[in-house]
Image: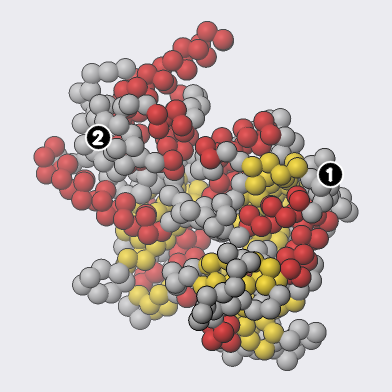
Amino acid sequence: AAFRPPAAGARTAPDGTFYAVLTSGSTGTPKAVAVGQRSLGALLRWHRERTGLRAGDRHSLHVGVAFDPHLLELWSALTCGATLSVAPDEVRWDPGALADWWREAGITVAVSSTPMVEPLLDRPWPAGLKVRHIYVGGDRLRRRPGPDVTATIHNAYGPAEATVVCTAYAMRGEPADGAANGGAEGDGAEGHGAVDGGAASEPPAIGRPVAGAVVCVADERGRIVPQGEAGELLVGGDCLSLGYLDEELTARRFVAAPDALTGVERVYRTGDRVRLRADGELEFLGRLDDQVKVSGVRVEPAEVEAAFEHDARVRRAVVAVRRPASGGVRLVAFVLPAPGASPAARDLLGGVRAWLPEQAVPSEVHLVDGYPLDANGKVDRAALLDAAESATEAAKATEATDGPAAEGPAAAGSGTAGGLDDLAGSASEVLVLRLCRDLLAAPAVTLDDNFTEAGGQSLTAARLLAAIQDAVGVRLRAPEVLRQPDLRAVAALVDKRLAAAAEVS
């Protein structure tokens, strides 16, 4: 198609376009971004220099082709003689399987989505990995690498309009001087750069501009704000794309640079709220268009999430907006408890009120043990809301027939397993059934049901595997679960692995 003459009336790409990628942004309406060879080339040079990527390295190709970070993976390896290792499908949604593949494939430089890497930072770092650098992006990173993490973790930020990555923040798990990690540079200089003095509990920054990129923070009128004040992130320089295929949209989002920004003619308005910290690092605060009005008060969901995460019992929080047919706005929080913690929703809300105005306190809080991801590896808030509604309806139906169900974490709602006390079966059968009822938000599921037909898919299977491993120390693979005829067979597989482990010990 690229070499055929365009059809009559077809919209053509700007001159110099190397590739075009669709991005929905925050509106859900696809926009085609045209990117030139110059900006992609600048990004690749920066990436190779930062990681020391060279012939003999093995670079992952893990990101799906619908998500533009795959271009960083693809061309970085092919332009310097490194080996490009293509990830098998079964590792795309399973963090544990991904780490195993990194080890088996000898990956030295990797790119993945934030929700895939964060669970690895929550656990003891896998042994035997050769990976030196891991780039994460697509969602807010809440975790920093612990002292056992042997790779440099790069918190990368960048819209497609700024060619994949325009700022990055590198963190080392083992600083040479023992100081707080952060601000590390790549293999090229083998230096740590500026060390972040922030607390380990604070979310990592999104860092400084990549080579050739120019950034600034501006107010609503496009004027640069003083350092430390929040504003919209504007991006310009070599990283900038050519614009959209829609010329009118390009004119609205790619605008003249502020007068105080020298050497740059135009900038892209990202729509992201950031703050330039005193140490020169950019701090991501959320989307400007994510702001909602609740009872006349402007609320930023990212700030509500941060309020929950001040609680040591909370590993992560995601806040979504529900707009009932009756009108108004309701904030719904989905809270992932910290390992070993089992907070009650009412207790969490008490702590949140110390940080937020009453209008910003969510009307619903659901304890979850994982987050569904969309095709690009980002948290799917719409799926969370749908699952919470389904779980609520299922819980009401269960309560009407069996009485109130016990409270406990679910995959995306308050639905919990009920009726397990009278189950005649092995401990593994009880465990698998309880977990599946929670994860699928389906209290009526039985051991005779098929996992996939009951609503399970690869993402749910990955969370089931992690929960089984946490409970009994057995690690299954997602394809194994998906191939079993029913949940009883899944439990039998757990028993088989437990028996094999006992023989070895």
Q: Which residue sits at x=63%, y=54%?
A: 70
Q: Which secondary structure, mark 2?
A: loop
79 versus 149 height, above or below:
below
Colour scheme employed for the rendering of this structure: secondary structure
Q: Which secondary structure, mark 1?
A: loop
Q: Nearer the viewer, residue 71 or 466?
A: 71
Residue 226 appears in view: yes
Label 2: few (<14), some or many (≥20) within 10 Å?
some
**Quadrant showing the C terminus:** top right
Residue under numbered circle 1: 55
Residue 149: percent from left, percent from top: 70, 40
Q: Nearer the viewer, residue 234 or 22?
A: 22
Residue at the top extreme? 503
**Quadrant showing the N terminus:** bottom right
Q: Which residue sits at x=72%, y=34%?
A: 106
Q: How far apart are labels 2 and 1 at the CA level?
A: 52 Å
Disc on the earlier residue, 2 or 1: 1
Give the mark toward the camera: 2 or 1: 1
Q: Which residue sits at x=84%, y=44%?
A: 55
Residue 493: percent from left, percent from top: 41, 20
Check disc 2 and give the amino acid type.
Answer: Val
Residue 173 appears in view: no
Label 1: few (<14), some or many (≥20) within 10 Å?
few
Residue under numbered circle 2: 445
Residue 374: percent from left, percent from top: 46, 54
Check disc 1 and give the amino acid type.
Answer: Ala
